[in-house]
């Protein structure tokens, strides 16, 4: 398959461009996505290429943007709803959860599909408490809404195209920390990554590590640090949080006997507990120790860059947690 070296941001833009060209019913609405090309430059020149009727600059009104998308999806369009940062999704939880995710089930069969994508950026950006949260667990807890999170440029392109073509509403989470990271990305306009399918990043027998999004990106960077110490983990990137594909995780844990869940959210009330419970339920007799977690401390993400770096995960923090677990198991 032919590929091209590009950034995560360019891969997202390419996916948008291909789907706009493929289907004239694809439209997009959000703040600064038109003339300015997006807050992070993701939408680029799509406004000039497809015009203001399809790439629509919106006022600073997230509720209105989501409401527009719901109405468009109900009437035959495929809207892409752009929410600049995931923190701002708190303003429009009601239309996303109570309407976008539920209308088909409340319509008595009148609404057969709701093909809307909510795009938003997650992760720390040295921008303080209102611009750094990853609130994936909140939305993953609601039936009727799919939640996906790509940690690489290739997955970003393939998953976004799948989300746009899906007939269910999809929350698509983009990794701010990965926007400028480059890799070889397939340029085939029919290249898709299926929603609800985990990916094995690397093979290993010492410990199973499961993650997604920014945390998976950082866990991948921890691999060479661990191999220097002779530790070989099996890293699995979930890619999708609803639906949740834990089959590769369960298969791996039955072999390694140990699991570390890495999540860039606090340990309590997050999705890491759900993953830990489901794996424990399926692998109780094979586990050599309780499922372990590597998460953020129980605090608000601070505004200062030095303090934010102290709070957020890093490849070294993940590597140290893995060494601690492997060392504890060896000592016992």
Image (spheres, helix red, strand yellow):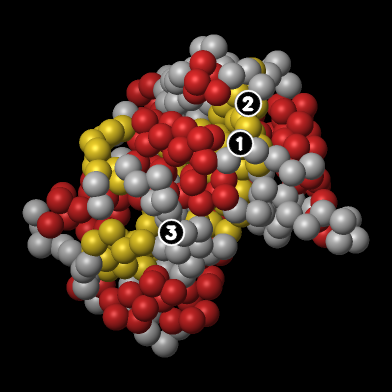
Q: In which quarter of the image is residue 54?
A: top right
**Marker disc for residue 238:** 3
Q: Residue 55 placed where, x, y %? A: 60, 24
104 w.r.t. 313: above or below: below
- Using the image as rendered, state which of residue 37 and residue 188 is in the foreground: 188
- Using the image as rendered, state which of residue 115 and residue 325 is in the foreground: 115
Task: For the residues labelled 1 and 2, say whether their Cβ atoms are less than 8 Å apart.
Answer: yes
Q: Which of marks 3 and 1 is nearer the N terminus?
A: 1
Q: Residue 16 placed where, x, y %? A: 49, 35
Q: Residue 33 placed where, x, y %? A: 56, 20
Q: Give me the C-alpha separation between circle 1 and circle 2.
A: 9 Å
- Using the image as rendered, state which of residue 181 and residue 249 is in the foreground: 181
Residue at 87% x, 56% y: name it: 110
**Marker disc for residue 54:** 2
330 left or right of 139?
left
Q: Residue 217 placed where, x, y %? A: 33, 45
Q: Which of marks 1 and 2 is nearer the N terminus?
A: 1
């Amino acid at each position: 398959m032919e590929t091209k070296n590009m950034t995560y941001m360019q891969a997202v833009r390419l996916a948008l461009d291909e789907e706009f060209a493929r289907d004239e019913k694809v439209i997009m609405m959000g703040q600064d996505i038109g003339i300015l090309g997006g807050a992070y430059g993701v939408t680029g020149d799509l406004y000039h290429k497809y015009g203001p009727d399809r790439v629509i600059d919106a006022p600073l009104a997230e509720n209105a943007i989501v409401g527009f998308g719901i109405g468009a999806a109900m009437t035959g369009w495929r809207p892409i709803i752009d929410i600049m940062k995931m923190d701002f999704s708190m303003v429009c939880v009601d239309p996303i959860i109570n309407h976008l995710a539920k209308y088909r089930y409340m319509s008595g069969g009148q609404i057969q599909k709701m093909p809307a994508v909510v795009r938003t950026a997650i992760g720390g950006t040295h921008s303080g408490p209102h611009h750094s949260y990853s609130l994936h667990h909140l939305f993953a807890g609601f039936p009727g809404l799919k939640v996906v999170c790509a940690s690489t440029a290739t997955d970003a392109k393939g998953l976004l195209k799948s989300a746009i073509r899906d007939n269910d509403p999809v929350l698509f989470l983009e990794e701010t920390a990965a926007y400028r990271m480059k890799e070889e990305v397939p340029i085939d306009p029919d290249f898709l990554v299926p929603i609800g399918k985990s990916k094995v990043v690397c093979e290993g027998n010492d410990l199973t590590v499961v993650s997604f999004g920014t945390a998976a990106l950082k866990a991948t960077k921890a691999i060479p640090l661990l191999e220097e110490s002779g530790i070989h983990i099996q890293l699995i990137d979930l890619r999708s949080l609803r639906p949740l594909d834990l089959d590769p995780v369960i298969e791996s844990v039955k072999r390694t006997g140990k699991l570390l869940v890495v999540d860039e959210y606090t340990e309590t009330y997050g999705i890491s507990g759900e993953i830990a419970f489901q794996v424990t339920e399926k692998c109780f007799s094979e586990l050599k120790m309780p499922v372990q977690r590597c998460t953020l401390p129980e605090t608000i993400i601070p505004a200062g860059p030095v303090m934010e770096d102290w709070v957020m995960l890093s490849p070294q923090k993940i590597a140290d947690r893995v060494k601690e677990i492997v060392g504890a198991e060896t000592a016992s």
